[in-house]
Image (tube, rainbow, N blue to C red):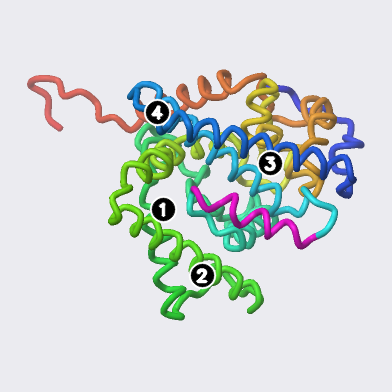
């Protein structure tokens, strides 16, 4: 953790438009992700069980990575024009059953209301609650979110879907309903594939990787605001950054540099590392590595669990 500096940062809060180079970098990330998905799919279909398991695990990691690429599209910081963001963002979320437009509306509200009671993220782990092992396990195994998606799909087809966290434009509502209907078509197609006798392909290429991806995505999102000051709107105190390595920065698509992202959310992700030194000098919650963060998280959960545990009963004493 770094002690905040009294001087004001100069670069951290500066806005920046997407340049041609930024767009090229993002397209390269997409191509790398697609190439790795093809390789992982090849491994997942291998006759050797250990190789196939490694392939499904890698697919789960890549599906998680794709949601982080989708996150950049939400902010319109991947392409110079606006339209490609939804065209690319929608398919990026399909493996994890994430509606691009629904995620975008909720996530932009998160940026607007961070540090206030109105802050509710799309992925529903509440970092303001006292951290316990039980809370972490429930977040890690948040498979009920998938059932909530099925509910959204059903309501979209019956015309009953509504946004439950305020007013949104009718166009946004139509976009969200269209995306949930698309997910419904894809799920129906997947069911047809299984009925036709190709269920093993479906299990290896989507179902099992999805089961792996749910906890992976939780671990990616967890550090953003956990154990930070939730009573302030100051991003230098309510958000965390992790320096990490080139691998974790690539895998999370810069989500580790979260202070930098919240300070100027439309800045292309590939430009965030140049702002990290200022975040490290001025912000309260900056970690060197994910190992440091998870060690701190485990210590906090252990402490809170010990506080909640009942005192041992002494023989002969009255309770």
Please tell me which of labels 2 and 4 falls first in the chain: 4
Between 227 and 157, the residue placed more toward the observer is 157
Which mark's residue is nearer the viewer, 2 or 4?
4
Residue position for label 2: 164
Residue 61's x, y, as percent? 51, 33
Q: Which-is-in-front pick, marks 1 and 2?
A: 1
Q: Which residues are magenta?
A: 82-95
Report the side of 104 relative to 181 (left or right): right
Label 1 or label 4, whichever comes before in sequence order: 4
Q: Nearer the viewer, mark 1 or mark 4?
A: 4
Q: Nearer the viewer, mark 2 or mark 3?
A: 3
* 5 vs 130: above or below: above
Task: Report the residue at 33% width, 24% height from top.
Answer: 49
Residue 160, picture quadrant: bottom left
CA distance for labels 1 and 3: 26 Å
What residue is shown at x 45% (from left), y 28% (from top)? Answer: 43
Q: Which mark is residue 275?
A: none
Where is mark 4, residue-wise?
46
Label 3 sits on residue: 30
- CA gap between label 1 and label 2 equals 16 Å
């Amino acid at each position: 953790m770094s002690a905040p500096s009294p001087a004001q940062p100069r670069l951290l809060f500066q806005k920046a438009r997407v340049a041609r180079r930024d767009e090229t970098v993002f397209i390269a990330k997409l191509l790398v992700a697609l190439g790795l998905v093809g390789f992982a799919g090849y491994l997942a279909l291998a006759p050797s069980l250990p190789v196939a398991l490694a392939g499904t695990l890698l697919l789960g990691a890549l599906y998680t990575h794709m949601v982080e690429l989708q996150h950049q599209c939400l902010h319109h910081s991947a392409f110079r024009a606006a339209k490609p963001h939804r065209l690319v963002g929608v398919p990026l979320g399909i493996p994890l059953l994430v509606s691009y437009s629904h995620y975008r509306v909720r996530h932009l509200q998160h940026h607007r209301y961070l540090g206030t009671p109105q802050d509710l993220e799309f992925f529903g782990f509440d970092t303001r609650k006292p951290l316990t092992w039980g809370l972490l396990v429930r977040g890690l195994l948040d498979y009920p979110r998938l059932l909530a998606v099925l509910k959204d799909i059903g309501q979209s087809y019956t015309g009953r879907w509504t946004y439950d966290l305020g007013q949104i434009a009718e166009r946004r509502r139509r976009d969200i309903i269209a995306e949930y209907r698309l997910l419904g078509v894809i799920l129906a197609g997947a069911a047809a594939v299984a009925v036709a006798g190709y269920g093993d392909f479906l299990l290896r290429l989507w179902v099992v990787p999805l089961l792996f991806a749910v906890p992976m995505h939780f671990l990616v999102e967890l550090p953003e605001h956990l154990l930070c000051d939730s009573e302030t709107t100051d991003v230098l105190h309510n958000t965390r950054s992790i320096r990490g390595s080139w691998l974790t920065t690539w895998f999370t698509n810069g989500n580790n540099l979260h202070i930098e992202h919240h300070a100027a959310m439309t800045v292309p992700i590939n430009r965030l590392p140049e702002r990290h030194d200022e975040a490290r000098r001025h912000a309260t919650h900056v970690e060197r590595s994910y190992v440091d963060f998870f060690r701190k998280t485990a210590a906090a959960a252990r402490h809170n669990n010990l506080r909640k545990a009942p005192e041992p009963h002494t023989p002969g004493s009255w309770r």
